Image (cartoon, rainbow, N blue to C red):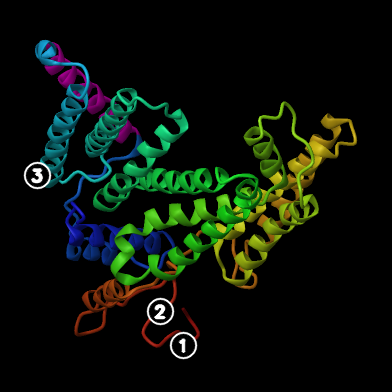
Amino acid sequence: MIIYNKKSLENLRLIDQAKIWKEKQLLSESLFEKIKGKYINDLYTPNFFIRTGLFLFTSILIGASLGLITLITIHDTISGYGLPIRMLIYAIITGITAEKVIREKKFFRAGVDDAFQYATLGLCISAIAIFFDNLNNNSESYYDRTDYTLQILTLSLPLLIFFAIRYVDRLISALAFGVLIYIIFYVVSNTGNIGIAICPFTICITSFLIYQLVKKYGYVEKRLLWKDNFKILELLSLLTLYLSVNYFVVRELNAIMNDEYSSSQIPLAWLFYITTAITPLLYIYFGIIKKDRLQLQLGMMLITFAVFTFKFYFSLGHHEITITLAGIIMIGVAWFVNKLLKTPKIGLTVDKDVLEKEFNLSDAEALVIAETMGKDSSQQEGFEFGEGNFGGGGSGGKF
């Protein structure tokens, strides 16, 4: 299903990991070059600025080309279902072009492939939207515009999932997650007062289940090509889990759904007070216990939002003094923790991870090949980890 060459993607991931090892002086320059020679990466992935430029240029080119075709054939456009058919034809053109460009030019997150795949996806969703708009307008019965939005999102979700898998795209993965959460939110909240009451808990449980599925099945060997996609899903599931039980979000969203001018106290307010304060602390606790950097960092950031929530409803006045003192305290805590963890403590450090948590057979294979290729029969060249010697697990006192 994936459009890119899987072997090239695996080699790219291994080379990126080898770069980290080289920066940490776990690999010498010569061994790093040998790994690059062994695991050849033929994909073109430019830096951020070149990628942005190529994306903008390609997007303009796509818009100009399709616009020119439209101007030439505008007399053939008919009202009704002619426009969605035209959109589908355009989507087929951009989709075929995307396949051809990626296969022949070996683009991977290069801006050009991004522009074509986003154009194809956008045209498909536009065709769906226009089709249902015409269908509902031609219907004799009245239809709700919100139901119209739900129709579009429900049919767009499979497309988003397909594009996220085929093109290994992180942004589309995030959009698919957002669409899924909105569909569940809409369906539950429109079942009456009971639905509105249980909506936060439904979103909380859904986010928790997605997080558990990602952690259990997302980082296995055969799915590591989509590792970045699963990281996005992991982050978003943790974020929506907290937002679904945050007192500020629940109270204000409840007022919006009930068409209230200003928010009022909600049922089970005491429970949401507790979840607002406790959930970030639980993220930090489990982040430390499980050595999960993402969960730890997110927990520390969400503490700020929890403080904002309580400050918003229970203000003691003098906001400028409160904000200044909070900023000073946060800077002080950040400085102290940063200094404390310069030397690793309880398995934590401020430095980036040297080894991936999801250490797998491919990485192990690269490590072995690097060692064997780095040694000759006279053992003149060893696999150097930093300034120490490797070959006995550090039995000589050096590692």
User: Between tags 1 and 3, which lies in front?
Assistant: 3
Numbered range of the magenta stretch: 49-71
Residue 8: percent from the left, percent from the top? Answer: 19, 58
Q: Residue at x 24, y 38 (%)?
A: 117
Q: Residue at x 40, y 79 (%)?
A: 389
Residue 378: percent from the left, percent from the top? Answer: 22, 84
Residue 227: percent from the left, percent from the top? Answer: 37, 59
Seen from the viewer's position, the closer of residues 325 and 354 is 325
Q: Which mark is residue 396?
A: 1
Figure quadrant of residue 371: bottom left
User: Between tags 3 and 2, which lies in front?
Assistant: 3
* Marks 3 and 2, the one that precedes in the sequence: 3
Figure quadrant of residue 264: top right
Residue 68 is inside the magenta segment? yes
> Along the horizontal axis of the image, is 380 left or right of 99?
right
Within-10-Å neighbours for mark 1: few <14, some 14–19, many 20+: few
Disc 1 to disc 2: CB gap under 8 Å: yes
Amino acid carrying label 3: it is Glu
- Can see residue 66? yes
Q: Which mark is residue 389?
A: 2
Disc 1 to disc 3: CB gap under 8 Å: no
Q: Which residue is mark 3?
A: 104
Within-10-Å neighbours for mark 2: few <14, some 14–19, many 20+: some
Amino acid carrying label 2: it is Asn
Give the dominant element type of the magenta stretch: helix, strand or loop: helix
Residue 369 is inside the magenta segment? no
Position of the N terminus by quadrant: bottom left
